[in-house]
Image (cartoon, grey):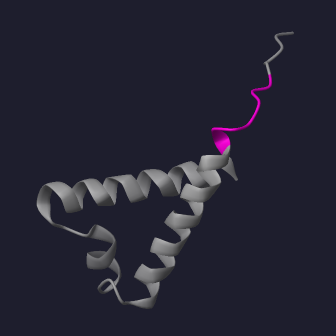
């Protein structure tokens, strides 16, 4: 779940970078506009992934044991 959340957060960050630099919303462009149902689903998943990723800040790290 952590990896999936990270992938979605990266997609969201790249999309926001494109919006900021070039005024291009790639998600909206690919899926038919900001109001299109697929775009809204992607935006919602990215938002939920951001919430999930926030929990990573507060987790205890488990040390990795070498064998």
Indicate the quadrant containing the C terminus: top left, top right, bottom left or bottom right. Answer: top right
Closest to the observer: 60 or 27?
60
**Where 43 falls versus 57 (above or below)?**
below
Whole-percent x and y of residue 9?
A: 48, 54
Residue 3 visible in the shown view: no
Outermost bottom residue: 36
On the rendered structure, is 8 left or right of 56?
Answer: left
**Where 45 falls versus 14 (above or below)?**
below
Outermost front residue: 58
On the rendered structure, is 40 left or right of 53?
Answer: left
The quarter of the picture where residue 50 lies is bottom right
The residue sitting at 35% across, 81% down in the picture is 31
Whole-percent x and y of residue 35?
A: 36, 89
Give the total of numbered labels.
0
Whole-percent x and y of residue 66?
A: 82, 10
On the rendered structure, is 8 left or right of 3?
Answer: left
The residue sitting at 59% across, 54% down in the picture is 5
Outermost left residue: 22
**Where 11 falls versus 41 (above or below)?**
above
- Whether residue 39 is in magenta: the answer is no
The residue sitting at 41% across, 80% down in the picture is 39
Closest to the observer: 50 or 30?
50
Outermost right residue: 67
Predominant SS of the magenta segment: loop
Start and end of the magenta stretch? Answer: 56-62
The residue sitting at 67% across, 47% down in the picture is 55
Residue 19 visible in the shown view: yes
């Amino acid at each position: 779940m952590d990896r999936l959340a990270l992938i979605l957060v990266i997609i969201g960050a790249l999309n926001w970078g494109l919006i900021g630099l070039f005024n291009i919303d790639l998600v909206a462009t690919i899926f038919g506009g900001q109001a299109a149902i697929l775009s809204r689903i992607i935006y919602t998943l990215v938002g939920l992934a951001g919430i999930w990723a926030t929990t990573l800040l507060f987790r205890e790290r488990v040390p990795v044991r070498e064998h």
